[in-house]
Amino acid sequence: MATAKTTTTRTRSTATASAKATTKPAAVDATAVIDLDRVRKPFYAYVGVADLAVEKLRALPEVYVHGVTTAQAQVSQARGSVKSLPDNVREQLQALPTQLQALPAKARGTYAELVKRGEKLVTSVRNNPNTKAALKQAKTARAQAKGAATSVRRAAGSAEKAV
């Protein structure tokens, strides 16, 4: 017969779980440490992307109006740049390898910015007095619902006994 004993501890930045299992032939001891800050980063990046998308969507009408007013100027400029198009393409092809090598660093930087943006938003929502009040009301409502369920169960039991 196997027996197991597990223990868990948690700090702000890490969670540790240890398990010791004993069986007749051998004993197993396992420990796992999880870096919670590293686990939270994708969530913060997701929140940061959503916040950035909302910001861009809010600015969309302004961008549209500006784009319509500058469209005529861009059409005139495009007619003049057709002659220099082959030279521009050659220059861009030569610069392409350098740009491709810079992409991973740029992606890491963008990811870090999104994580920072998401963490800032989550912290501000968490510390908002309205959020704290809503959480307190939810805890009160949960306790009341639990109490109501208990009293209904007891009333049903006493009614059953009476019958």
Image (cartoon, rainbow, N blue to C red):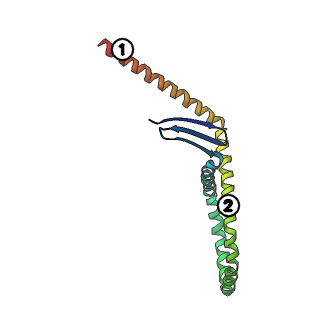
Instruction: Determine crowd level at label 1: few under 14, some 14-19, many 20+ residues with C-alpha closer than 10 A.
Output: few
Residue 28 position (above or below residue 103): above
Q: Could you tell me which residue is drawn at 64 percent across and 63 percent down? A: 63
Residue 75 position (above or below residue 64): below
Q: Could you tell me which residue is drawn at 69 percent across and 81 percent down? A: 94
In percent of width and height, residue 76 lies at: 67, 80
Q: Could you tell me which residue is drawn at 70 percent across and 75 percent down? A: 98
* Amino acid type indicated by mark 1: Ser
Q: Reading the chain from its start, which is encountered first: label 1 or label 2?
A: 2
Tell me the quarter of the picture where residue 31 sits.
Answer: top right
Q: Could you tell me which residue is drawn at 51 percent across and 41 percent down? A: 26
Q: Depth-wise, is mark 1 or mark 2 nearer the camera?
A: 2
Instruction: Determine crowd level at label 2: few under 14, some 14-19, many 20+ residues with C-alpha closer than 10 A.
Output: few
Query: Which residue is denoted by mark 2 in the rendering?
Result: 108
- Left or right of 63? Residue 159 is left
In percent of width and height, residue 65 lies at: 63, 64
Task: Find numbered disc 1 in the image and state the secondary structure of the residue it sits on.
Answer: helix
Q: Is residue 80 visible?
A: no
Q: Nearer the viewer, residue 156 or 53?
A: 156
* Amino acid type indicated by mark 2: Arg
Tell me the quarter of the picture where residue 106 sits.
Answer: bottom right
Is there CB contact under 8 Å for labels 1 and 2? no
Query: Which residue is denoted by mark 1 in the rendering?
Result: 158
Q: Indicate the quadrant containing the N terminus: top left, top right, bottom left or bottom right.
A: top left
